[in-house]
């Protein structure tokens, strides 16, 4: 259930969150979308009391184990947005997965844009409105 956080006008970047699972060992090696000039993988890391964000080249997907791309861990940053992303829109996003045989597979997802107030599954108990 991938989703993108909606943006306010003039905002230049936003996060993409999803749960990924691969049947065999693989790596997430690329991501692109026409909505942004570049897309990067980032990892949030708590060092003591400081939250550090660093760019990573790839995200390992262990066979059969899900990886949560969520706030507070690995996630995808869309940088250099071409326009405001509004809740309710759907944005195409292509992820590139490399298998252990080095074969690359491109998977295009249609990712909904969720309101700024939306909290994904990793944000504790869900609130129903």
Image (spheres, rainbow, N blue to C red):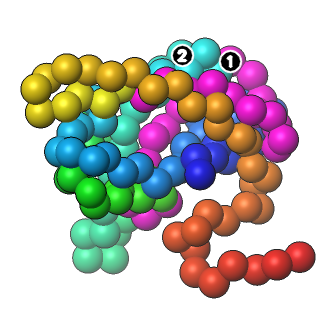
**Tag 1 or tag 2, which sits nearer the N-term?**
2
The quarter of the rendered structure image containing the C terminus is: bottom right
Magenta-tinted stretch: 71-95
State yes or no: residue 28 in magenta: no
Whether 21 is drawn above or below 47: the answer is above
| Residue 117, picture quadrant | bottom right
* Crowding at mark 1 (Cα within 10 Å: few <14, some 14-19, many 20+): some
* Pointer 2 with pointer 1, Cβ within 8 A: yes
State the residue in front, 128 or 40.
128
Q: Report, in whole angstroms, how far the alpha carbon at label 2 lies from the one at label 1.
A: 7 Å
Residue at 64 percent across and 32 percent down: it is 110
Residue 73 lies within the magenta run: yes
List x then y, in percent, for residue 5.
67, 47
Q: Secondary structure at mark 2?
A: strand
Which residue does the numbered mark 2 point to in the structure image?
37
- Residue 73 picture quarter: bottom left
Query: Horizontal and vertical percent for residue 53?
Result: 36, 51
Q: Quadrant of residue 84?
A: top right
Residue placed at 52% from the left, 70% from the top? 122
Q: Position of residue 14 (x, y in %)?
A: 60, 40
Q: Provide the residue designation for mark 1.
A: 82
């Amino acid at each position: 259930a991938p989703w993108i956080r909606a943006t306010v006008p003039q905002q230049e970047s936003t996060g993409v969150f999803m749960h990924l699972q691969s049947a065999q060992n693989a790596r997430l090696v690329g991501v692109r979308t026409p909505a942004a000039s570049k897309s990067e993988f980032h990892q949030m890391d708590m060092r003591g009391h400081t939250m550090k964000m660093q760019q990573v080249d790839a995200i390992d997907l262990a066979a059969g184990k899900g990886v949560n791309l969520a706030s507070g861990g690995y996630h995808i940053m869309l940088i250099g947005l071409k326009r405001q992303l509004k809740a309710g829109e759907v944005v195409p996003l292509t992820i590139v997965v490399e298998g252990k045989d080095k074969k690359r597979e491109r998977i295009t997802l249609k990712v909904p844009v969720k309101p700024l107030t939306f909290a994904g599954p990793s944000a504790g108990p869900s609130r129903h409105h």
